[in-house]
């Protein structure tokens, strides 16, 4: 399996950043007029210069991490008290909806704190389990 | 003796070189103009062992931006080296009208790049809004296993990407009026949108403000990054078909390729 590096920076407020090379490296390296008969510089070693992205989306590792994160959420408790139609079914539920969102946010935040502590261990366990499953299913990857 | 020539861009004849007139390399190579008819190429010596180093990438970009203060510049891709001066002269002499038309199009314009990045954010919110995700979540909880986890995780990734694409599309609509053209950037993993705009220099701050407002609106759900002004790297063709003809690409979970929306 390909290993991917994942950046967790969701606690940072996303503000537009200006003029860093990393945000435009794709444009500088890949756009601009090209003349066929010219020589082109070697792009050896360029992999270190990449657009700084938040998450690598298309990877099984990421999928598994998302699934883990979802499974740590306690949605049941939240949706029992406020049904989904109440929350999103229109019908003048603005305040309700807001309250629901805030409650949920709090729940998630505290959940996240706990989850972070357990994350390292859980990840290892998940990785181990994954390997077992994979070795049990030859050719499934 | 033949000597390789590093080429920064093409300008109209009579364009003034910046001071200090230095480009890439360490120590920096001296810039000079190579005139052919109504056009000049901005060139320098090609340093030995030229690589895409951070220092030289920045120098290439800075040189082009400084040049553009004196008039339009048709930027070459980083690392364009003519095997010798004669080859470069021949290229300059080829289709000069086309190059002049492109220069006219770029006169007083800058490129701004907008990227919309997928953000994980609050997964609980995402699940509450998506019955399909909740179903997969339920399945994954009641029947835990590799396959169910991958299915859930992939659906989450798709949902996050769709959310970023929606935010990007809205933002593009909001800034469209300030711009003259757009061109998709290369595919960047994790980017739901990578789109460059050509706009009059005087619209730059309004463009930036509009993106910043949109970024605040979508904070925590999608990250919007604006970069620029850049040399007009993405607009070097004389008559680009209007961006509106770009076909919408099928939306996939996978790193969403650059999309180009129609101009209004």
Image (cartoon, coloured by chain):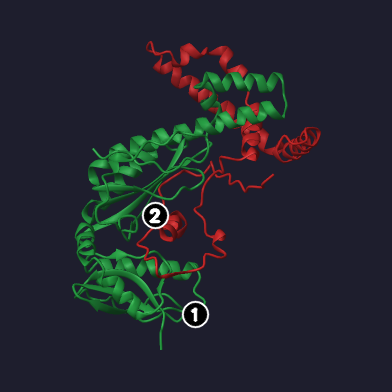
Chain colours: A red, B green
Residue at position x 51%, y 52% in the image: A52
Q: Chain of mark 2?
A: A
The residue sitting at 60% across, 46% down in the picture is A6
Q: Is residue B248 above or below residue A39?
A: above
Residue drawn at 43 percent across, 58 percent down: A30
Question: What's the chain of the residue with tag 1?
Answer: B
Left-right relation of B141 to A42: right
Quadrant of the frame with the C terminus of chain B: top left
Q: Between marks 2 and 1, how big is the CA–CA gap? A: 32 Å
Q: Position of residue B138 (x, y in %)?
A: 64, 19
> Label 1 belongs to which residue?
B48
How many C-alpha atoms fall within 10 Å of the one at disc 2: few (<14), some, or many (≥20)?
some
Q: Residue at x 51, y 30 (%)?
A: B159
Asked if B248 appears above or below B93 in the picture, the reply is: above
In which quadrant will I find the N terminus of chain B? Answer: bottom left
Q: Could you tell me how many numbered marks the image carries?
A: 2
Front one among A59 and A125: A59
Which mark is drawn over residue A18?
2
Does residue B31 appear anywhere in the picture? Answer: no
| Element assignment for label 2 | loop
Determine whether, in the image, residue A134 is placed left or right of residue B40.
right
Q: Is residue B230 above or below residue B196?
A: below
Q: In x, y percent, where is residue B219?
A: 43, 38
């Amino acid at each position: 399996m390909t290993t991917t590096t994942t950046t967790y920076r969701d606690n940072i407020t996303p503000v537009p950043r200006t003029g860093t090379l990393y945000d435009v490296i794709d444009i500088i390296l890949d756009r601009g007029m090209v003349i066929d008969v010219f020589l082109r510089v070697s792009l050896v070693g360029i992999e270190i210069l990449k657009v700084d992205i938040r998450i690598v989306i298309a990877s099984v590792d990421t999928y598994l991490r998302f699934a883990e994160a979802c499974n740590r959420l306690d949605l049941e408790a939240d949706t029992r008290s406020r049904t989904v139609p109440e929350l999103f079914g229109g019908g003048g539920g603005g305040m309700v909806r807001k309250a629901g969102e805030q409650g949920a946010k709090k729940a998630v935040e505290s959940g996240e704190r706990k989850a972070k502590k357990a994350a390292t261990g859980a990840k290892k366990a998940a990785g181990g389990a994954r390997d077992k499953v994979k070795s049990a299913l030859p050719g499934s990857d | 003796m033949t000597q390789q020539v590093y080429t920064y861009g093409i300008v109209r004849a009579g364009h003034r070189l910046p001071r200090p007139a230095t480009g890439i390399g360490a120590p920096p190579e001296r810039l000079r103009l190579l005139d052919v008819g109504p056009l000049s190429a901005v060139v320098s010596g090609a340093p030995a062992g030229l690589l895409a180093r951070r220092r030289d990438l920045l120098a290439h970009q800075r040189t082009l931006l400084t040049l553009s203060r004196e008039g339009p510049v048709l930027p070459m891709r980083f690392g364009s080296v003519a095997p010798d001066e004669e080859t470069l002269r021949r290229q300059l002499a080829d289709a000069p009208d086309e190059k002049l038309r492109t220069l006219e199009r770029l006169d007083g314009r800058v490129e701004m790049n907008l990227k919309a990045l997928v953000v994980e954010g609050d997964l609980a919110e995402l699940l509450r809004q998506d019955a399909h995700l909740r179903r997969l979540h339920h399945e994954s909880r009641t029947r835990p296993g590799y396959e169910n986890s991958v299915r859930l995780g992939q659906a989450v990734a798709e949902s996050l990407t769709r959310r970023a694409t929606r935010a990007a599309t809205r933002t593009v609509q909001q800034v469209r009026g300030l711009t003259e053209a757009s061109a998709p950037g290369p595919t960047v993993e994790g980017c739901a949108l990578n789109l460059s705009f050509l706009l009059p220099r005087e619209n730059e701050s309004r463009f930036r403000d509009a993106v910043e407002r949109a970024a605040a609106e979508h904070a925590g759900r999608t990250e919007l990054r604006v970069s620029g002004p850049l040399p007009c790297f993405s607009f070097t063709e004389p008559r680009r078909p209007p961006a509106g003809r770009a076909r919408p690409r099928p939306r996939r979970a996978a790193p969403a390729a650059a999309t180009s929306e129609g101009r209004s």
